[in-house]
Image: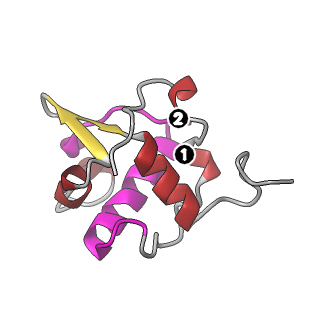
Amino acid sequence: MKGFVVRAPEDCPIGPNDIDGSRHFFDAFGDSDAEDAAAYIVKFCQNRGMWVSFTLEEVREEFLPNIDFSGLISTHRLVERDGVFYVTTSFAAACYESSPAGRGKLEPA
């Protein structure tokens, strides 16, 4: 599923803090390695308070030296341009659907 690239907070109604990054994203991406990578990306962005662009080296330096984004790129959940990665709206939605943080702003009252 393709989504729109998120470059600013207003590009996506789901922010990283709307997602519980401490839980595994079961069945969100169809592959355990992709789901693990997604959790690290969510945590990386949570540490910055919003969806941000990033390099593989930045995430590896903060979390794991062998993290792999290929499963997220092949499904268009991440977009890479000149070595910089961007999350997509479909990435945010899949993470949120799998593991919302408490009462997220998209959850009905």
Q: Amino acid at mark 2?
A: Met
Residue at image mark 2: 50
Q: Amino acid at mark 1?
A: Pro
Residue at the spot x=54%, y=45% of the render?
Answer: 16
Report if the CB atoms under discs 1 and 2 are less than 8 Å apart: yes
- Residue 77 picture location, percent across and down: 32, 49
Residue at the front extreme, as displayed: 1
For disc 2, the neighbor class at 10 Å (few under 14, some 14 to 19, many from 20) is some
User: Under tag 1, what secondary structure?
Assistant: helix
Left or right of 23: which side holds 52? left
Residue at the right extreme, as displayed: 109
The residue lying toward the viewer, choosing from 108 and 34, is: 108
Residue at the spot x=49%, y=58% of the render?
Answer: 95
Residue 46: within the magenta? Answer: yes
Residue at image mark 1: 16
Looking at marks 1 and 2 on the same chain, the residue that comes earlier in the sequence is marked by 1
Residue at the left extreme, as displayed: 82
The residue lying toward the viewer, choosing from 50 and 2, is: 2
Residue at the spot x=41%, y=50% of the render?
Answer: 91
Q: Which residues are magenta?
A: 28-57
